[in-house]
Amino acid sequence: MYKFFISFVFLLASLLLSAQGIKEYYVPSNGVNLYVKSMGNGEPLIMLHGAMVDMNDWEYQTPELSRSYNLILIDTRGHGKSSFDNLPLSYEKMADDVVNVMNYLKIDSAHILGFSDGGNTALYLALQHPNVSF
């Protein structure tokens, strides 16, 4: 009975997410699996959170922003639901992770919004990947 209840809860949660247009992915990137969530319509807007938190820090901004943008929220490696490879974190690696997510989702260009470590990652994106349209 317990297993049935847990399965039912997961099924219900999945149906609610899909009804809201929310899609979830695990994207492989340089030895880790990044948890990614997308929602909304319009041009892609990649949202990068700060250190020691996860994508849930954007919970108050996503309802309004998803009206105008296709939001792509990424849990940075070692944060939230993303895995970690026990190697030192770097902005270079996190910038590469963002490009890998874009490639996985077939996104050619995107707006980038980040705070704290997410803002630094956005700067490294522009420096390391000048051929990608941000």
Image (cartoon, grey):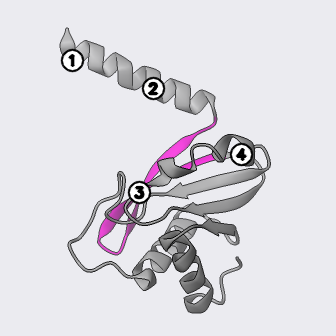
Q: Amino acid at mark 1?
A: Lys
Q: Residue at x 42, y 64 (%)?
A: 76
Residue 66 numbered tag: 4
Circle 3 SS class: loop
Question: Are there few (<14), some (14-19), or many (20+) residues within 10 Å of tag 3?
Answer: few
Q: Main secondary structure of the magenta part?
A: strand
Q: Quadrant of the C terminus?
A: bottom right
Tell me which segment is drawn in magenta. 21-39
Q: Residue 40: image x %, image y %?
A: 70, 44
Q: In this figure, which residue is indicated by the disc labeled 3?
A: 53
Q: Earlier in the sequence, mark 3 or mark 2?
A: 2
Q: CA distance from mark 4 to mark 3?
A: 21 Å
Can residue 36 be seen here? The reply is: no
Q: Earlier in the sequence, mark 3 or mark 1?
A: 1
Label 4 or label 3, whichever lies nearer to me, is: 3
Q: Residue 103: image x %, image y %?
A: 55, 70
Q: Is residue 68 left or right of residue 39?
A: right
Residue 34 is a magenta residue: yes
